Amino acid sequence: MAPAQPELKKVSLTDKTSKPLLNFSLILPQYLDKRLFVQLNGSRKVIGVLRGYDVFLNIVLDDAVEEKDGGEKVRLGMVVIRGNSVVMLEALERIGGDRDK
């Protein structure tokens, strides 16, 4: 008999009332001035440097580039992205820690 596999659970960023489950005000400060990959509604993808955010998860990205299907890249410069269109944020640089010191 094969060993039992751990159960995978899906984690939602919001509950059924659309209230955030995570406190982004505690998480996002470590992402400031870091290059991020941002997945948006409609399969849009943007890469840029996080310059600011607010309590609604609206974010300001600098040096932003949108990656279109087929590999085409469109330079956007500085953009504001509405928080309700953000599906996922991923750091493209090391976040936190003093490993290099």
Image (tube, rainbow, N blue to C red):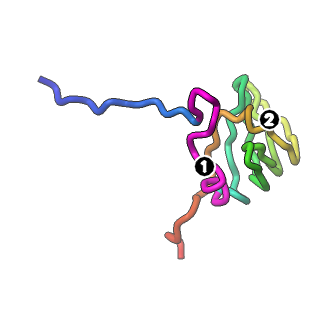
Q: Nearer the viewer, residue 50 or 9?
A: 9
Look at label 2 and name its amino acid.
Lys
Which residue shows up at 76% across the image and 51% down it? 53
Q: Is residue 57 above or below residue 14?
A: below
Q: Residue at x 75, y 33 (%)?
A: 67
Q: Amino acid at mark 1?
A: Asn
Camera-side mark, 1 or 2: 1
Question: Which percent across, then down, holds residue 78?
Answer: 87, 48
Q: Position of residue 98 (x, y in %)?
A: 52, 71
Of 31 and 18, the residue lying toward us: 18
Seen from this angle, which residue lies furthest bottom? Answer: 101
Image coordinates of residue 45 in percent, x first then y, are: 72, 33
Question: Residue 56 shows which numbered tag?
Answer: none
- Residue furthest front as drawn: 17
Q: Which residue is mark 1?
A: 23
Residue denoted by label 2: 73
- What kind of element bears circle 2? strand
Q: Residue at x 58, y 36 (%)?
A: 13
Q: Which residues are magenta?
A: 14-30
Residue 17 in the magenta stretch? The answer is yes
Neighbours of disc 1 within 10 Å: few (<14), some (14-19), many (20+): few
In the rendered image, residue 89 lying in the magenta stretch gets the answer: no
The one of 11 and 70 positioned closer to us in this rendering: 11
Residue 91 is situated, as x and y percent measured from the top left of the image, at 62, 49
- Which secondary structure lies at badge 1? loop
Residue at the image position 88 percent from the left and 46 percent from the top: 77
Q: Are marks 1 and 2 in contact (CB under 8 Å)?
A: no
Distance of mark 1 from mark 2, alpha carbons? 32 Å
Q: Who is closer to the viewer here, 16 or 25?
A: 16
Q: Residues within 10 Å of mark 2 (few under 14, many from 20)?
A: few
Q: Quadrant of the N terminus?
A: top left
Seen as rendered, the residue at the extreme left is 1
